[in-house]
Image (spheres, rainbow, N blue to C red):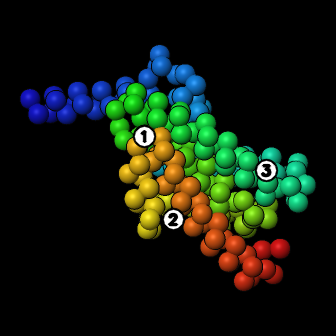
Amino acid sequence: MIHRLSAMTIQENESVAAPAGRRDWAWAVSTLCGIGHLRPGPGTWGSAVTVVLWFAVARSIAPSQQPAAALIWAAVATAIGIPAATCEARRCGLHDPSHVVVDEMAGQMVTLIAAPVQWKTLVLGFILFRCFDILKPPPIRHLERLPGGVGIVVDDLGAGVYGLVVLQLITHAWAGVFR
């Protein structure tokens, strides 16, 4: 009986996490068009895809305009991501569903705001953001308690700020390595 209930719960959770008939704008935005369903580590996949996309896009932007473009990208991901994450969290009945990864995009872009667009800084920014997102140093853990999509996205923005500060300290301290 317990095994049957456990199997039923797993099936219900899987069907909620990837609703075949409910793939609307909120699903597309919150999962980054399904990236959030990749395993293992959907958040890591969301961050990795963001870094690769930023590298591709930033190469066509003048270096002096890249910080503003990264800031705008983070702001748009946040503005659209909060309502999308709220809808998807309500739909599946979870406070912070693992398949919602638009928050990783927003936070990762905050980390990269003033980073030179080169492989060393992008890889370091990726690692720093993922570490801060997983460890959630104070006050980030408190931010994830905010309701709905706000809590889902804002804690990653906090991790992004930590990543931004540390990345800037490292790239300025070892400027010769990162130029």
Q: CA distance from mark 1 to mark 2?
A: 23 Å
How many C-alpha atoms fall within 10 Å of the one at disc 3: few (<14), some, or many (≥20)? some
How many C-alpha atoms fall within 10 Å of the one at disc 2: few (<14), some, or many (≥20)? some
**Looking at this view, is 19 or 74 the one in front?**
74
Can you tell which of label 3 and label 1 is closer to the viewer? 1
Query: Which mark, by number, is residue 131?
Result: 2
Mark 1 and 2 residues: CB-CB less than 8 Å, in contact?
no
Residue 175 is situated, as x and y percent measured from the top left of the image, at 78, 80
Image point (61%, 40%), residue name: 79
Mark 3 and 1 residues: CB-CB less than 8 Å, in contact?
no
How many C-alpha atoms fall within 10 Å of the one at disc 1: few (<14), some, or many (≥20)? many
Type of amino acid under label 2: Cys
Write down the residue under mark 3.
Answer: 69
Q: Which badge, 1 or 2, is on the more N-terminal residue?
A: 2
Taking 16 as reference, is 51 left or right? Answer: right
Write down the residue under mark 1.
Answer: 148
User: Which of the image's four quarters has the C terminus?
Assistant: bottom right
